[in-house]
Amino acid sequence: MKKSEGGQGHSRLTLRLWDFTGTALLNLFMVLFLVVYLSPLPFMVIASLTPRNQFLDGNAPILPSERVKFNYEGKALIVYEVPTEDGIKHWALYKPSRKSSEFIDPDNPQAGPILWQGAWRTLKADYRFKPTLDNFKDFLGVARMSLYFKNTIIVALISEIGVLFSSIAVAYGFSRFRIPGINYIFFLLIATIMIPSNITLVPTYYLYSGHMLNWIGTWLPLIVPHFFGSAILIFLLRQNFKSIPRDLDEAAMLDGAGPLRILISVILPQSIPVVTTVALLHFFYIWNETRMSSLYLGIAPHLQLVSFAVQRNQTYFFTPEALMVGALMVMVIPVIVLFLSQRFFMQDMIVTQIEK
Amino acid sequence: MDVLKERRDLLRNRLTKPTRLQQEARIGLLFLSPWLVGFVLLKALPILAALVFSLTDFHMLAPNETRFVGLENYIRFFSDLEARASLFGSLRYFLWTVPLEMVVALALAAIFTSDRLKNKRMSQTLIFMTSIIPATSIFFIFLGSLAYANRLIFAPLNLPPIEENNLLLVLMALWSIGPGFLIMYSAMKSIPNEMYEAARVDGAGPFARFMYIRLPLISPAIFFTLVINLTGAFGGAVLLDRGYILNFSLSPMESYINNMMFLETDLGYASALAWVTFGVMMTLTIFLFWSAKRWVYFPEEHKDEEI
């Protein structure tokens, strides 16, 4: 009997060992996945801190660095790795010439110039790790970032009010009222999500142009359409409103509450996560906006929104460090907002019964 | 006579005083009105207007000289090699990226349901984070990282440097799985545990439980993700719109139409092209919805709930 107990203990130990290995492997896999998945982002930070001339040197290290220099007779000389008979020496280039050059040994400058036979251009320069903020200074000197941020935030806030008001009202209408043919109207709503934006582009552009409304060069084409609600946000809100039990509505109705009262004091307090999600989705939408701002704000640079403005700025300087600085500046605010709101954002997005 | 009078009164009441149901419908329609007005003004009328434009030689610069040209623009599409190539480019993009996005998002969602995974919220946010990065940033990141990738990975392995567009394609697709991943993950979380227990008792292994219980139950979420990915591939309103980069849209057809509009200012032809895209898109959508009946599980709803 004792033996079988021992056997059981053994199997329990194996089971626990298996369990532990499984957990470790799973977590290791997730960490590895995230490292690979996010790997371009560290490059973005590295490149944005790298001095421009480092990209011109094929032998330069990956990390942001500066060349090692040696002060000799009031001149900053660049230190190179020089192969000699006694091994590799770190010498500063004093008098470059095509076939042979003169070097100074930084450890022993009194010895004077040393003549070295060979082409100095083939030598590798010495580098020392040193990140620089010059790229950011250059970028901020050219791009009027505070203006673009301000414009984007104004447009986002005004259209946010409109899109939230309308989408919540419409989603409430879809989730709580018996209207003949409502299923067909809802199907129409789903269908509009899938309409490619360029089918409506020509007529709406004509509508906003000088021929009709004359809204080009203003924020109106970017703001006003949101006051009619957004189909995909209505859909998300409606799914959530439907999951709230109707008993509460009915109780409020017996107490004499009207439909608007029920929406404000029964439905909305229970929908804070989904309303937050929807509000954030709209904020990200405006932040990423380039279609409309390129079309309608192209002639008004002082009204331009951040994504398109930076895009336009940075495509003049197609150097890696300038691009990465631009990328960082555009994405930093949405990423901060996402991390601050991760408790609410997109948690429990249940989308079932889409056809109904 | 009494019966008749009663009937008449009833009818008069019904005509003058709205019943509860009618009143409810009216209030409901009032709530729907912002979207209904927007739908007519910003969707339905523009789509019809585009159809009318597509039958004319409407030019932005000379709107007064517009003539009706019939189907000429559509005939031009069939002989326009570049337009057809763009359309196939969009379709090819869809065929390459959407399955990739779906499989990766679904696999991640399945891994996330495991109780053994630590720091779920952090990983979830990190996976989602890439989906909110604007197209501008992604394009710059990709251009800047290409040199690093070639130098650190491809040169040491003696591989040829990667081609620009393919990498961008994969990067953009994988970096937009966030919404789909979260939607499918939430759907998986909402499956009651008893279902798995019952299956386990019946002797179903982990694979069988995944294939026959989890997948069918989250099929509505899979379907929704598929629809938004399809929409994204054709430049529709997706859950997280990235915007696009100058003339470099990920949907080649979209960029071609924009070129027609703003470089050639040929609005008639641009409208015809947009209608062709619209037609292709609608065909695909109808096919998807038709196929949904075969593989998407819709829970039964009660009649009175189905408002």
Image (cartoon, coloured by chain):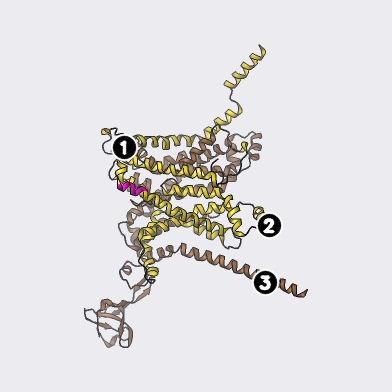
Horizontal and vertical percent for residue A313? 32, 55
The residue indicated by pointer 2 is B201
Going 42% across and 42% down the picture, which residue do you hit? A223
User: Colour in which chain B is shown?
Assistant: yellow
**Numbered disc 3: secondary structure:** helix
Q: Is residue B65 depicted above or below A327 in this figure?
A: above
Residue A210 is tagged as 1
Query: Which dot, 2 or 3, sits closer to the camera?
Result: 2
**Tag nearer the camera, 2 or 1:** 2
Which residues fall within the magenta stretch? B81-87
Residues A156 and A115: in front is: A115
Q: Residue at x 69, y 70 (%)?
A: A12
CA distance for labels 2 and 3: 24 Å
Magenta span: predominant SS is helix
Residue B5 in sight: yes
- Which circle's residue, 1 or 3, is located before the other in the chain? 3
Let me know if residue B200 is in the magenta part.
no
**The disc numbered 1 marks a residue on which chain?**
A
User: In this figure, which residue is indicated by the disc labeled 3?
Assistant: A13
Chain to which the residue tagged by mark 2 belongs:
B
For the residue labelled by badge 1, is the local secondary structure a helix, a strand or a loop? loop
- Classify residue B261 as left or right of residue B21: left
User: Can you say which quadrant of the picture contains the C terminus of chain B?
Assistant: top right
Tags 1 and 3 touching, CB below 8 Å? no
Residue A43 falls in image quadrant: bottom left
